[in-house]
Image (cartoon, grey):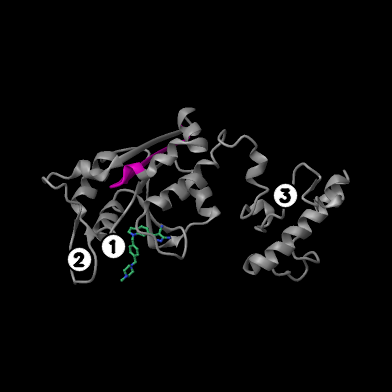
Amino acid sequence: PALRADVVTIFPDYLAPLRLSLIGRAAQTGILDLAVHDLREWTHDRHRTVDDTPYGGGAGMVMRPEPWGEALGALVPPGTTPVPRLVVPTPAGRRFTQAVAVELAAEPHLVFACGRYEGIDARVAADAATRMRVDEISIGDYVLNGGEAAVLVVLEAVVRLLPGVVGNPESLTEESHAAEHDGLLEGPVYTKPPVWRGHEVPPVLLSGDHGAIGRWRREQALERTARVRPDLVPVPVAGRGLDGLT
Ligand SMILES: CN1CCN(Cc2ccc(Cn3ccc4ccc(-c5n[nH]c(N)c5C#N)cc43)cc2)CC1
């Protein structure tokens, strides 16, 4: 497979959507080798306890290190090659971007540690870092209850970049946040009918004039980006083209 992905979680059913559609097909065609594991497999007490109270006080509970240490030891036994990258979603992680997705898509083996409660005992990542690369990432500046939704996001963004997963590879570069598109947002898209509820498709798109169409689309992308995400609009650099984009 192009990518092996192990996901460890106390809510394995939460990752069921990965069996569907794009990622499901990638798994079936052998491009992706996905395995979801229940952390409680690596507990030994009657209540299969995975959490405990935080040292230093504070609200909530913290995930105990022992089950995680055993889980990661079982999934990545000493001497495993290639050494996987451990991806740990956390509110305190580095921002997950398309560039990070491209980076992760180049890895042969990813292990995802889904935390819950207030997070995982910090020694788990510290201990793993002695044997593998540990990447603490956040999918955005909002608060979730655990890492599972983040893994769904990260895996979708990563798997769609693998060769053979997306039917039309050009669609991977023409869209927003792809470096080839200068990081601009993509503009509006249209399909038949040419008029729908009185709304016309912009005539230039029906003109067959591909130069004009390309200019119009760039103008639309610039306009939309300036309106919705001014932070993404490149500033003109002295000595470069007029719009700083050429
Ligand atoms: C007093 N305050 C001090 C700040 N903490 C912060 C805090 C700590 C844990 C949780 C819940 N949680 C547990 C594991 C886990 C993984 C990812 C994410 C996550 N949230 N948002 C993203 N973009 C995420 C990603 N990726 C959340 C997670 C929520 C909030 C709360 C208490």
User: Residue 147: percent from the left, percent from the top?
Assistant: 37, 54
Q: Is residue 226 visible?
A: yes
Q: Residue 2, relative to residue 175: is it above or below?
A: above
**Mark carried by residue 54:** 2
Residue type of the residue flagged with mark 1: Glu
In the rendered image, residue 214, in percent from the top left (x then y), is placed at 81, 51
Please tell me whether mark 3 sits on a helix, a strand or a loop.
loop
Q: CA distance from mark 2 to mark 1?
A: 9 Å
Residue mark closest to the camera, 1 vs 3: 3
Q: Residue furthest left?
A: 46
Separation of residues labelled 1 and 3 (CA atoms): 42 Å
* Residue denoted by label 3: 189
Q: In this picture, which residue range is highlighted in magenta?
A: 1-13
Q: Are marks 2 and 1 in contact (CB under 8 Å)?
A: yes
Which quadrant would the C terminus be assigned to in this image? bottom right
Can residue 234 be seen from the camera position used here? no
Instruction: Please tell me which of labels 2 and 1 falls first in the chain.
Output: 2
Q: Is residue 41 magenta?
A: no
Task: Give the secondary structure at mark 1.
Answer: loop
| Residue in view at x 78 percent, y 60 percent | 219
Q: Residue 121 at what x, y percent from top left?
A: 24, 59
Residue marked by disc 1: 118
Q: CA distance from mark 3 to mark 2?
A: 51 Å
Q: Quadrant of ligand 1?
A: bottom left
Few, some or many residues within 10 Å of mark 2 (<14, 14–19, 20+):
some
Report which quarter residue 16 is drawn in: top left
Helix, strand or loop at label 2? It is: loop
Camera-nearest label, 3 or 2: 3
Vertical arrangement, residue 177 with respect to residue 48, above or below: below
Please report the residue visible at 25 percent of the width from the left and 45 percent of the height from the top. Answer: 39
Measuring 24% from the left and 58% from the top, which residue is drawn there?
123
User: Mark 3 or mark 1, which is nearer the start of the sequence?
Assistant: 1
